[in-house]
Amino acid sequence: MPGAASASATLEALEHPIVQAPMGGGPGTAALAAAVSGAGGLGFLAAGYQATDAVRADVDAVRATTERPFGVNVFAPPGAAGDPAAIARYAEALAGDAARSDVELGEPRHHDDGWAAKLALLAELRVPVVSTTFGCPSPAAVAELQGAGAEVWVTVTSPEEAATAAAAGADALVVQGVEAGGHRASFDDATPGDYGLLALLQLVRAQVGLPLVASGGLATGRAVAAVLVAGARAAQLGTAFMRTPEAATSGMHRAALSAATPTALTRAFTGRTARGLVNRFLAEHSDEAPPGYPEVHHLTAPLRAAARSRGDADAVNLWAGQAHALGADLPAAELVRDLSRAARAAVAEAVDRLGSGR
Amino acid sequence: MPGAASASATLEALEHPIVQAPMGGGPGTAALAAAVSGAGGLGFLAAGYQATDAVRADVDAVRATTERPFGVNVFAPPGAAGDPAAIARYAEALAGDAARSDVELGEPRHHDDGWAAKLALLAELRVPVVSTTFGCPSPAAVAELQGAGAEVWVTVTSPEEAATAAAAGADALVVQGVEAGGHRASFDDATPGDYGLLALLQLVRAQVGLPLVASGGLATGRAVAAVLVAGARAAQLGTAFMRTPEAATSGMHRAALSAATPTALTRAFTGRTARGLVNRFLAEHSDEAPPGYPEVHHLTAPLRAAARSRGDADAVNLWAGQAHALGADLPAAELVRDLSRAARAAVAEAVDRLGSGR
């Protein structure tokens, strides 16, 4: 069992078993990460879509607020470019949207979001926890980060990905169920997978001995307790933190999260599978959107920016996990403490019930 | 909150919080249901696909073995018939399969599987628990069954279905996550939904006050414990019981369940969304299979029978939940006791960990 002897000192030392999911493209802020870490959970910065200077500034800002550990998440290289002809056809399909918004579609560029530069920066900054999404660092990259004092956490969506990450030397795994909002962390978006969180936790636990952080559709203390009982060391929540005042979630997105709107998986916004609230753009374009990340992200960016500026929630990516409707507007520190308290109460209640002579 | 005052005496009285999922079309047997109930769980018979005489015989057989409560599951009427032209096109697409198997495709009949006759029979037999799949009985039908001494459990896959079932007077809800093997229980297969179990449990719990039974991808005591902590009164497992000696699962199916083969949702076998192991037939025909249940079930029945008789696992419906690879070959009573014991241990471990000064 590769990595069976590893452990995560960061997870062991957490006051509350709550990890704030990194949220690129807006909602995640240094203030949010600092508030969560300061409250005894683990806050995360999202390096995805950011210039290295901005990541550096965010790390400095967190460290100016709290001495406690925090994490930074990096997008692994997305693999091969999408098919240019398919992306061109999708651009044609979006021509009506572009004309109505009076914008030009963006240039569908392929790139790796500065992977090597970001890993080097995080090593230089001696960030306590580095997590990855969309793939697994090489064993050499894992070792280099660990040599710089970081724990390396890899986000996985299948037992096979878990085995790969363990073999690469990861210190812990973030186990992402299909319930999760935003991008699927799958190593290969051609097979994004569909494991529900609880099934996946059982399968990964049977496969590797690493500490696990459970992610996807967790909105209540009971659900946090459930994943701890299932064998995770902590629960990672994203959507739940999007409504905190520390998050930079748009007002439109905040309002949408509190409604009982269904979610769906789609490549329509970015060319990579992600879960968002069903709106017009998602419904109209999901079937025709090709794989191609981040090309399609850049292609649709002007459409989304225009929709945001005119307040049109029907044409922006409203990432949300399946339990989004259960969120509340609370300061991040309060949310961390509330979830932790409710999780303990749920476990205590189960002990009372199971022990009552059944 | 409709039904908030209701409770399930059956669930309250269970020695072990384990419900065996009804499994129509083969694996479910009276011996299995009797063994599970006899061990202190709750066994279920599957009335789907069965003649009423066969259901009566199964109920008699369970009662001859154990005095403990058990349940019978009934398929609710499947709604409107599928599009005959689409089904005819699918029949053409299956012509090669039929020729290779040297069989004629079945007659794509639409019917309600004897819904009214089966409800009347179950009332006559005073069955302790009647559950439904594919829909919710009318309030009058619920009341009639309750008047005959039955608890009525409705299987739901969304918060909206939960609200409908509560309004109809259900005594308890079986909450089925997308991880589950076999047919999705969704009321309308046009929108089969994709809620993961843990997200769905939280959403349903926020919506209705009824006792909940959690179903989908549960294969270990830890997962049973997780759903209890999340607020369910019991866990329902199907795939885990398919490998017991009391089940009538085919040898081919048993062997397939123990491998790490991925599962997928498909309408290819029955015209209704169901989760099975990915094999040739599923991979080749899922994209072209139209909705139309039970027409497509009847259409493909001769193909599946022929494949079974020649031992070809690539052309039969190998229903399986996402955690199928974690199963074991154990007698049903032992499985019930093992799961219950492991669930208690998992909760106790969580109390120790959460209470250890974190």
Image (spheres, coloured by chain):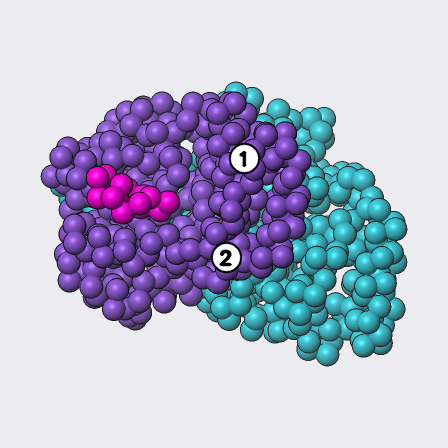
Chain colours: A cyan, B purple
Task: Give me the disc on residue B73.
Answer: none
State the residue lying farthest toward the left: B67
Query: Mark on residue B189?
Result: 2
Quadrant of the rendering where the C terminus of chain A is positioned: top left
How far apart are labels 1 and 2 at the CA level?
Answer: 23 Å
Give residue B346's position: percent from left, percent from top: 32, 36
Residue A21 percent across, percent down from the top left: 57, 51
* Mark 1 element type: helix
Q: Residue at x 81, y 58 (%)?
A: A90
Instruction: Estimate the x, y position of residue B181 in percent, counting from the top left.
Output: 45, 41
Left or right of A201 in this view: B347 = left
B148 on left or right of B206: left
Which residue type does callout 2 highlight?
Asp
Q: Which residues are magenta?
A: B45-58
Q: Is residue A44 above or below residue A156?
A: below
Identify which residue, A33 or A277, lies in the foreground: A277
Residue that numbered label 1 is attached to: B303
Q: Is residue A40 visible?
A: no
Q: Which mark is in front, 1 or 2? A: 1
Membership of B46 in magenta stretch: yes
User: Which residue: 72% across, 26% down?
Assistant: A140
Q: Nearer the viewer, residue B71 or A319?
A: B71
Left or right: B129 as drawn, with respect to B178: left
In the rendered structure, the residue with mark 1 lies on which chain? B
Local crowd at mark 1 within 10 Å, few (<14), some, or many (≥20)? many
Vertical position of residue A165 compared to residue A249: above or below: above
Q: Nearer the viewer, residue A259 or A278?
A: A278
Query: Secondary structure beneath disc 2?
Result: loop
